[in-house]
Amino acid sequence: MATRRLTSEAERRKSLPRKIFLLVLLLSGAAPGVRADQILLKNGNRLEGRVTATAPGRIRVELDAGSSIEIELDQVAERIPGRSPLELFPERLRAMPREDRDGFIELARWGEERGIKRCAREAWREVLRLDPHQETARQRLGYALHRNRWVLREALEDAGFVLHRGLWVTPARVAEMEAEERAGRLDDLLADAGHDNPFVRENAMHELLQLDDPALIPALRRRLSDGDPLRRMWAGRVLSNFPFEEWGQLLYRATLGEVRSEVRSAWGAILRSSGDARIGGWLATDLTQAGADPSRRHALLALAATCPTHAVVEPLIGWLEDPQWGPLSRRLLEEWLGPLPVPAEDVRARWAGRRESLPADLGTGWLSSD
C-alpha cells in the first residue's frame, strides 16, 4: 500500500494533525481486522498498534491487550499504515502446530520484542504445556525455582520470602547469609594480617582496626579459639573496638585458658587498656579459688601482673604460705609495695596500713579509683 509522507516540517504542522485525526475517526468505526498504524514521533520513538481518536488533536495507540498510550497529534512526525502485532499475534498463535514447542518459543519472543507481553504469555503457556520445566517460560509466567520446585513468585512473597543473590529465602536467612559473608571477609583479613607481603599485611591490619560492625561480634568470639595464634590475637584486638560488655569477661576467661604466652600477653594488654575495674574483681575471685592447676595459676599471676589493682593484693597474700607459689607471689607483691616482712600476717598488716595511700592501679596509674 502506498504511504503518504509529508515532505517538509511546515507541511506536517499544517496538514498532518487533521488528516490523521480524520483517518483515525474513519478507522475506529471499521470492522475487525482493519489495518493498524505505526506512529513515528518527532522525538524518534516509534509506536505500533491500533489507533483510535479520543478528542480533537489527540489519539490513543493500543499497544497491548489492555495497554495504551495517548499522545498529542503535534507530537507525531509520520504515520505508516499497517497491521499491528496485536492483530497479527492471534493469527500466528492459531496457525502454530500444537506440538511445535520451539515455534511457540519463537512466537513468544516475537511478541515480547514488539511490546505485546500479555499476548506473549499465551505462547509461553503453550510452551509449558509441552515442556513443564522450560526455564524461560516458567520465569516469564511468574514462577521461581525454590527447593527444586517451580513456585509462583507471588506465593513466595506472600509466604514472606525475598529474592537474595538469586535465591528465595526468609529475611532471617538473608541476615545469616550476610553475616557469613562478613565473617568470610573477616577471616581473609585475619589471614592477611600474617602475610609475607608487608603491603598486604599492613592493609589488613589497618582494616581490622577499623572494623566496627556489631554483627561481627559472634564471629570474633568464635575466632578466640582459632587454631592459629596470630588470628586469635587479632580477634581479641578487634573485639576491643566494641563496648567492653560485649567481650570483656569472654576475653578474660580466654586469657586464663590461653596456652601461648605471646597471645596471653597481648590479650592481657587489651584487658588493661580497657580501663575497666571489674577485671580486678574477677581476678580476686579466681585467685582466691585458684585450685591446683599450675597452668591456671601461672595465667592468673601473669594477668595480675598485667592488671595490678588493690583487689588482687589480698588474695596474693594468701598465696605466700604456699611452698610452690609463695615466692612468685612475694616477688609480685614487692614490685608493687616494696620490701615486705616474711610472715603473711605481717604483710597483711603492712598492706592494711598502706592501702589508702596507694593508687588504685599499683602499676602505672591505669585506674583512677577502685
Image: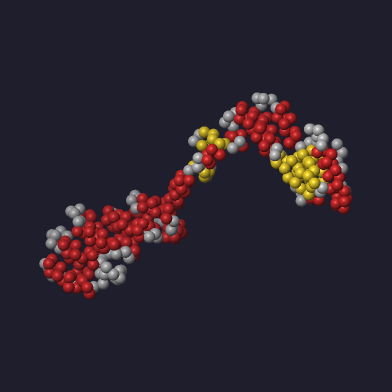
Residue 345, position in %: x, y?
A: 12, 67
> Which of the 4 image quarters holds residue 329?
bottom left
- Residue at figure coordinates x 30%, y 69% from the top left: 367
Q: Is residue 349 left or right of residue 282?
A: left
Residue 155, position in %: x, y?
A: 54, 38
Visible in this render: residue 327? no
Q: Residue furthest bottom?
A: 357
Look at the image and tell me in which quarter the N terminus lies. top right
Q: Is residue 32 left or right of residue 66?
A: right
Q: In this view of the protein, which residue sits in the foreground, 187 or 87?
A: 87
Look at the image and tell me in which quarter the C terminus lies. bottom left
Residue 366, position in %: x, y?
A: 30, 69
- Residue at figure coordinates x 45%, y 51% from the top left: 182
Visible in this render: residue 130? yes
- Residue at figure coordinates x 54%, y 34% from the top left: 150
Q: Is residue 2 above or below residue 211?
A: above
Q: Is residue 359 above or below residue 66?
A: below
Q: In this view of the protein, which residue sits in the foreground, 266 or 144?
A: 144
Q: Is residue 263 left or right of residue 355?
A: right
- Residue at figure coordinates x 72%, y 27% from the top left: 95
